[in-house]
Amino acid sequence: MNVLITGGAGYIGSHTCVELLNCGYDAVVMDNYSNSSPSVIGKIATITGKKFPAYECDMLDLDGFEKIFRENKIDAVIHFAGLKAVGESVEKPLEYYHNNLTGTINLLRLMKKYGVHRFVQSSSATVYGTHNTAPFTEDMPLSTTNPYGATKEFIERILTDICHADKNWDIALLRYFNPIGAHPSGLIGENPNGIPNNLMPYIMKIAVGELPELHVFGNDYPTPDGTGVRDYIHVCDLAAGHVKALEKIDSFHGARAFNLGTGKGSSVLEVVHAFERVSGVKIPYKIEPRRAGDIAICYADCTRAEKELGWKAKYTLDDMCRDNWNFIRKNH
């Protein structure tokens, strides 16, 4: 099976590309490198020992996008490409709606034109909003609190409507929780530009001396240590989930949602202490007021993915922190 991976040089995309190639799939990568690096393509080839076509292209460039379909026989698509910073989406909603929705519609139009009907969507636990209670299950009502989350919810709706209109489509909606970690080789991992928005990259910046301290938003939540609890999942576990979805996708007959998490929550301070434990580096932190829109506890019920995909997360929190630290030390 020849799989097009949009955003394939990004954090989750690159790890999924490695997993696909190692499992015998062929890959075609597309990325505009706005939040990634072309050097990742060579690193994927080094890890896997395999070469594959890679295109520098933007989702909004319909002609450039179509060139990929003309030059390759695509059998399935895994769709990662898109803007993804929650805070930035609040400041630039039009940019997020235009890029994420129009870009995805361009992709779906090309898939329809070239007869490609297998699709794996990179979705997010943000679609569960703030009104549901953990553990989150796939049949809960969806809502969002920011434009980034809204684009994920809208895309899920578009894909569901496509399946209702055309029974040829088989679509997996993979709702990620909080990906951290890096490939054990240390060659690829998460290294965002500027000041990170997420916990683990921020901890990494502190560990290498680029930032002074961690800002912990709220220590009065109804959790064991008062800090917010999230479901952190190793990016390699997440990548394996995409391969399992492709293996089973022909049996879906429509759009099917799956949570990809560990099914266990860890607090902010538990993550900090786990990183300190495996790295030997002290992470100073300062308690700040709660952030508007944050919820106390968020973790997944992964029963459906385990039963229907045969997938279950394997890595521990210490594994995630260790691999992250290994990557940063090799690439700082």
Image (tube, rainbow, N blue to C red):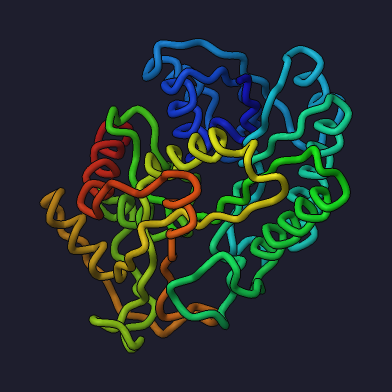
Residue at image x 73%, y 15%? 73
The answer to whether residue 74 is left or right of residue 197 is right
Residue at image x 71%, y 45%? 253
The answer to whether residue 23 is left or right of residue 225 is right
Q: In this rendered view, identify the residue nearer to me: 195 or 242.
A: 242
Q: Position of residue 17 (x, y in %)?
A: 50, 28
The answer to whether residue 278 is left or right of residue 266 is left
Residue at image x 75%, y 20%? 68
> Hey, which quadrant is residue 9 in on the image?
top right
Q: Position of residue 293 (x, y in %)?
A: 55, 80
> Hey, which quadrant is residue 227 in on the image?
bottom left
Q: In this rendered view, identify the residue nearer to me: 255 or 322.
A: 255
Quick check: can you spot residue 91? no
Q: Is residue 188 above or below residue 193?
A: above
Q: Is residue 298 above or below residue 158?
A: below
Q: Is residue 81 above or below residue 139?
A: above
Q: Is residue 272 above or below residue 60?
A: below
- Quadrant location of the N terminus in the rendered image: top right
Q: In this rendered view, identify the residue nearer to me: 195 or 243.
A: 243
> Hey, which quadrant is residue 276 in on the image?
bottom left
